Each structure stands twice: as structure tokens, then as C-alpha cells.
Image: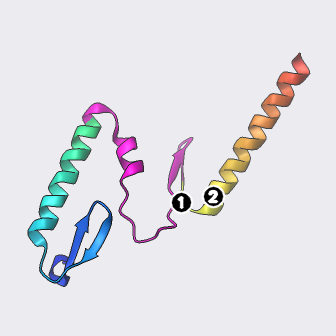
């Protein structure tokens, strides 16, 4: 649908062009699918996802950790605070034992 509106997909996001880039978009999609399939086979899909995100929002944050999906800055900051608290508690416990 977006191809008919002159939207072309690239590894850097969407780009407006003055023609219908349907074939180019299909070729791009095919290359992405091959890349993902290879990454799944080699166990490197997470690396690919982290390096290759197409997003209309430059602010998007998506982190999966401990089975949780953190998709806002606030959620990430809360998670980081929890991690810092646990580390401080662990360090205090280790100091008390020595």
C-alpha cells in the first residue's frame, strides 16, 4: 500500500520517492527475511534486531530483560534503578560478610 504512495523502505527507514517502489520494497523485504533466517539459524537474531530497527520514532526504546518488555523511557529508568539497588544491596551484603 505504501509503495503506491511512493514510500520506499531502506535499511535506514522509509524514504519518499517519485515512483512506485513496489519491486524494490519486495527485494528489500526478501533480503531482510533472509538475514533474519540466517540469524535465527546462527543464534544471532538479538544482535540483528538491536542493530537494525526501522522506526518512525527516534525515541523508541525497547529492552527485554528478565522476561519483561520495557518500551518507555520511564520503564527503562525504573528497571535501571532496580538493578542499581540490587547491586548496592549485594555489595553491602558482601561487605558485611567480610
In which quadrant of the rendered view does residue 66 lie? top right
Q: In the rendered view, does 71 fall on the left or right side of 46?
A: right
> Could you tell me which secondary element the residue under label 2 belongs to?
helix
Q: Residue at x 37, y 49 (%)?
A: 49
Q: Which residue is mark 2?
A: 75
Residues at marks 2 and 1 touching, judged by CB atoms closer than 8 Å:
yes
Q: Residue at x 78, y 42 (%)?
A: 85
In which quadrant of the rendered view does residue 83 lie? top right
In this rendered view, identify the residue nearer to me: 68 or 71. 71
Question: Residue 2's spot in the image, x, y percent?
Answer: 21, 78
Disc ID at residue 71: 1
> Could you tell me which secondary element the residue under label 1 belongs to?
loop
Q: Is residue 2 magenta?
A: no
Q: Is residue 95 above or below residue 2?
A: above
Which quadrant of the rendered structure holds the C terminus? top right
Alpha carbon distance from label 2 to label 1:
7 Å
Which segment is the magenta one? 41-69
Which quadrant of the rendered structure holds the N terminus? bottom left
Q: Is residue 47 above or below residue 56?
A: above
Q: Residue at x 32, y 63 (%)?
A: 12
Q: Dot 1 surroundings within 10 Å: few (below 14), some, or many (20 or more)? A: few
Question: Residue 79's spot in the image, x, y percent?
Answer: 66, 50
Amino acid at each position: 500500500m505504501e509503495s503506491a504512495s511512493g514510500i520506499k523502505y531502506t535499511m535506514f527507514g522509509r524514504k519518499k520517492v517519485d515512483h512506485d517502489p513496489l519491486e524494490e520494497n519486495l527485494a528489500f523485504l526478501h533480503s531482510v527475511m533472509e538475514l533474519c533466517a540466517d540469524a535465527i539459524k546462527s543464534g544471532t537474531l538479538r544482535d540483528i534486531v538491536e542493530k537494525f530497527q526501522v522506526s518512525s520514532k527516534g525515541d523508541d526504546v525497547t529492552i527485554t530483560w528478565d522476561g519483561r518488555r520495557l518500551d518507555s523511557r520511564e520503564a527503562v529508568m525504573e528497571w535501571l534503578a532496580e538493578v542499581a539497588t540490587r547491586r548496592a544491596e549485594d555489595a553491602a551484603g558482601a561487605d558485611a560478610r567480610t
